[in-house]
């Protein structure tokens, strides 16, 4: 087979994949828009809002202010100070003294085999009295209907566990460059609309910023005990829930909850690096496959397109079609997620950065370095 024939087959393969990505991006976006219900209920089952906090003096006040002012009536807020080294305990103690809805719990030493966040959430659940547990991060800010949204959608979709995309707040180019990649799975391989109906554990998606559990489901699996030593505890919790037959639903909560995950480019790189290898269950073959796929299928067509144009090559239209289709798929999802206008156009750079972070994660894990995260080493 001649070289031009091989080139044609390469472009046909990339175009076919890009068509699939367009379909997945479109169906995921339509699902999030059409199946996410507006908050309606202001009364119903009691909800325990559970907030793990470690060194969160800059964020916890905003979070609690937003949670105190909810339209939903029957709920409590419990905050667990995970042995902070700053003023977190002082702040949450003051809120607890001033508002009867807020309870402050002082953290204890980590038991053997537990990472900090899953242990904090396990401890929080011990003090909860609700029929539903809403776990939310200390750096989230909630609109006044966030609890109503959770109850409305959980009941409407008969969900055992409900999670969703929050609105990500970006204030620097570095944050956009790294964190755009957190939506990549919804374009490449994760049909969000199949999560409630497909039993495969890998077809699951949970974001730790917002997880709404039936208390009975949480207790029946002993909470976070099965994922106590996973860095990406939310990812593994989703897979564990699917293994146990729970009905998991993933929707769009960005109109009611926002979060700024990281404040610097370095923080964002470290945050993704500590999770990405763990996400793939530390299988290096998966990182190799990801590298080949992204560089060969997504980045290479962008490199070849200008070469085709400048040399008047025979594959200009195929190269342009391949690039245009993926750009359309990527743009649709990112714009739906409220990303800056320029973010989709940077995708070759963003994906090469992702490959760098992935291999950094592999190397750091292989060397046993781990990551210093809020004063603790995780690896």
Image (cartoon, rainbow, N blue to C red):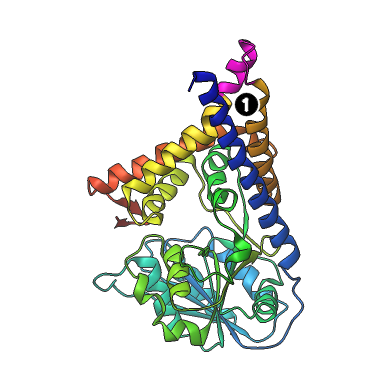
> Horizontally, is 378 left or right of 264 in the view?
left
Give above or below for 306 relative to 93: above
* Left or right: residue 184 compared with residue 252: left
Instruction: Please state the horizontal and vertical placement of residue 333, each as a whole percent of the image.
Output: 66, 48
Q: Secondary structure at mark 1?
A: helix
Position of residue 180 measured from the top left corner of the image (x, y, whole percent)? 57, 45
Does residue 366 lie above or below 241 as drawn? above
Q: Tell me which corner region of the image, top left, top right, bottom left or bottom right, holds residue 89.
A: bottom left
Q: Which residue is mark 1?
A: 319
Q: Is residue 218 magenta?
A: no
Give the number of marks: 1
Pick the residue in front: 47 or 67: 47
* Extreme-top residue of the structure: 311
Q: Main secondary structure of the magenta part?
A: helix
User: In percent of the image, x 35 and y 74: which residue is there?
Assistant: 226
Q: Specify whether residue 358 is in view.
A: no
Q: Which residue is pictured at 62% across the width and 46% down the height?
A: 21
Q: Tell me the quarter of the image containing the C terminus.
A: bottom left
Rendering coords of residue 206 (x, y %): 52, 65
Neighbor class of circle 1 (other Cα within 10 Å; few <14, some 14-19, many 20+) is: many
Residue 212: x and y in percent read 56, 75
Viewer-proximal residue among 95 and 374: 374
Tell me which corner region of the image, top left, top right, bottom left or bottom right, holds residue 59: bottom right
Residue segment shown in magenta: 303-315
Is 98 drawn above or below residue 62 in the view shown? Answer: below
């Amino acid at each position: 087979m001649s070289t031009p024939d091989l080139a044609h087959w390469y472009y046909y393969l990339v175009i076919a994949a890009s068509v699939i990505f367009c379909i997945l991006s479109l169906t995921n976006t339509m699902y999030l828009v059409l199946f996410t219900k507006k908050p309606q209920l202001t009364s119903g089952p009691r909800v325990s809002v559970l907030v793990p906090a470690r060194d969160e003096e800059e964020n916890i006040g905003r979070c609690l202010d937003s949670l105190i002012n909810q339209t939903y009536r029957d709920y409590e807020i419990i905050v667990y100070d995970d042995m902070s080294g700053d003023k977190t305990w002082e702040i949450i103690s003051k809120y607890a003294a001033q508002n009867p809805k807020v309870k402050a719990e002082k953290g204890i030493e980590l038991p053997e085999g537990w990472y900090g966040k899953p242990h904090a959430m396990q401890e929080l659940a011990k003090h909860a009295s609700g029929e539903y547990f809403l776990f939310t991060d200390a750096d989230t800010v909630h609109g006044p209907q966030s609890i109503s949204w959770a109850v409305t959608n959980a009941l409407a979709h008969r969900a055992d566990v409900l999670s969703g995309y929050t609105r990500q707040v970006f204030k620097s180019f570095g944050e956009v460059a790294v964190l755009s990649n957190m939506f990549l799975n919804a374009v490449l391989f994760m049909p969000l609309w199949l999560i409630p109906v497909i039993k495969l554990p890998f077809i699951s998606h949970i974001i730790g910023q917002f997880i709404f559990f039936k208390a009975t489901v949480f207790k029946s699996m002993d909470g976070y005990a099965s994922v106590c030593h996973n860095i990406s505890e939310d990812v593994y919790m989703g897979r564990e829930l699917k293994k146990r037959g729970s009905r998991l639903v993933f929707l769009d909560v960005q109109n009611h909850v926002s979060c700024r995950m990281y404040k610097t480019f370095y923080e964002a790189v470290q945050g993704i690096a500590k999770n990405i290898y763990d996400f793939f269950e530390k299988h290096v073959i998966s990182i190799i496959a990801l590298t080949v796929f992204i560089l060969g299928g997504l980045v290479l067509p962008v490199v070849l397109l200008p070469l085709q144009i400048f040399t008047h090559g025979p594959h200009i239209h195929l190269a342009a079609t391949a690039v245009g289709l993926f750009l359309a798929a990527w743009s649709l999802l990112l714009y739906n997620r409220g990303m800056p206008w320029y973010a989709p156009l940077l995708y070759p750079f963003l994906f090469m950065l992702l490959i760098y972070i992935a291999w950094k994660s592999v190397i750091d894990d292989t060397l046993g370095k781990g990551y210093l995260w809020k004063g603790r080493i995780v690896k």
